[in-house]
Amino acid sequence: MAGRMRSGRRPLREAGFTYLALIIMLAIIGLAGAATLKVDALTRRAAAERELLETGAAFSEALRSYADATPPGQPQQPPSLQELLRDPRFPGVRRHLRKIFVDPVTGKAQWGIVRIGGVNNNGGGVLAVYSLSKDRPLKIANFDARFQNFDKKEHISDWTFAATGQAISHPQTPPSRP
């Protein structure tokens, strides 16, 4: 009986299986971690796109409010986004927008601006704003009624936020500063 007992050591074959099992377990944990990071990145991106839509809706509403408050005979589009923060056409403080928002997709307070007479026409009023992100959107269909013509857009920068109810298309051009 003493010949059958070992001195506390496993046979080499068992040690090899334990090592192989450990490697497989680490690979599975690594794959699960990578999948979790991918899902997290997609979840954050989808949240940023939802936030961009709400921010864009605020810009659209501000442009509509500015146009509605325009006295007869004056342009209905602001010369810049700054006029949405404090409308200089009135003696008191009149705000159409509380702040120039940061683009949740790019992380910058810089927006593309579509102007009357073209994007680079600094003399034309602001017709619409858009994100400067060239990324493909995760959301490509089933948009809220506020975002007409956003279906199947190739880039997030194709989502153009104009005064409520207007559809504006813009050429891809350099950004304008607010």
Image (cartoon, helix red, strand yellow):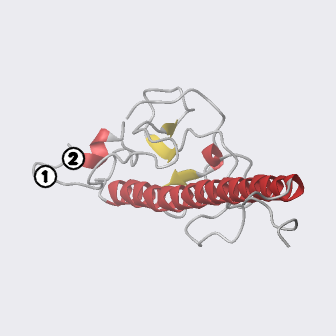
Determine the secondary structure under disc 2: loop
Where does the image place residue 147, in percent across and percent down from the top left?
59, 64
Q: Is residue 84 visible?
A: yes
Mark 2 vs 1, N-terminal side: 2
Vertical order, 110 against 23 (above or below): above
Determine the secondary structure under disc 1: loop
Q: Amino acid at mark 1?
A: Val
In whole angstroms, how far apart are the C-alphas of marks 2 and 1? 6 Å
Q: In terms of depth relative to the viewer, which is nearer, 131 or 30?
A: 30
Q: Quadrant of the N terminus?
A: bottom right
In the rendered structure, the answer to whether residue 11 lies left or right of residue 161 reads right
Q: Is residue 115 visible?
A: no
Where does the image place residue 97, in percent across and percent down from the top left?
30, 54
Q: In terms of depth relative to the viewer, which is nearer, 37 or 160?
A: 37
Q: Quadrant of the C terminus?
A: top left
Give the residue displayed 51% in from the left and 30% down from the top.
175
In the rendered structure, the answer to whether residue 112 lies left or right of residue 151 reads left
User: Residue beneath label 2, please?
Assistant: 86
Are the two marked residues, 2 and 1, in contact with CB atoms closer than 8 angstroms? yes
- Residue at the limit of the structure toward the left, as seen here: 92
**10 Å neighbourhood of mark 1: few (<14), some, or many (≥20)?**
few
Where does the image place residue 89, in percent across and percent down from the top left?
21, 45
Where does the image place residue 177, in percent across and percent down from the top left?
41, 30
Mark number, residue 93:
1
Vertical order, 73 against 112 (above or below): below
- Residue at the limit of the structure toward the front, as seen here: 2
Q: Amino acid at mark 2?
A: Arg
